[in-house]
Image (cartoon, rainbow, N blue to C red):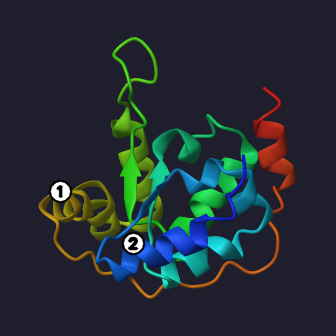
Amino acid sequence: NSIPQFVPDQFFNFIVNEKIPIVAHPERNLGFQKRPQLVYEYVQRGALMQVNEGSLRGRYGEMAELLAFKMLEHNLAHFIASDGHKPNSRTVTLAETYEIITEKFGKALVNQLFYANPVKAIKGELIETNNPVPIEGNLKPSFWQRLKHLR
């Protein structure tokens, strides 16, 4: 629900020790939702961001969905993950999200987020970022986004 105060210092320690922090589902964190420009700041400091596929499909509310798409639009997402933990709950459902991202952003980005970057992370290889762009202002869901989440 928040970003602990020790995180910036810990990230610095990771970078100094040649470890790259990967932040899991920052779009679901209230701290990042309230101050989306922090996502950019963390990426600039060397962190990588992993967006949850459920956020892109609205499963975790309008603010998580809005920030997830803003991160994609601003080159601030480096992985798309399923958040699958068990076969009976939070199962792996990447196909629908794969199609959504392909349609909105194209095959090149899909390949990077779903395949190339995860493989590089597993192998311990350098993951290059695509010119991250700051997210300006606060997140404000549109009327249609609010309506969608009333269902």
Residue reaching furthest to the bottom: 131
Residue 122, label in figure: 1
Q: Which mark is residue 14?
A: 2
For residue 102, say whether it is visible. Answer: no
Find numbered disc 1 in the image and state the secondary structure of the residue it sits on.
helix
Element under disc 2: helix
The single residue placed furthest to the left in the displayed view is 123
Q: Position of residue 14 (x, y in %)?
A: 39, 72
Q: Give residue 129's position: percent from left, percent from top.
A: 37, 80
Farthest residue, direction top: 88
- Where is residue 22, by image quadrant? bottom left
Label 1: few (<14), some (14–19) or many (≥20) C-alpha neighbours in 10 Å:
few
Q: Between residue 57 and residue 79, name the one nearer to us.
A: 79
The correct choice, above or below, for 45 with respect to 102 in the image is: below
Is the C terminus in the top left, top right, bottom left or bottom right quadrant? top right
Q: CA distance from mark 1 to mark 2?
A: 17 Å
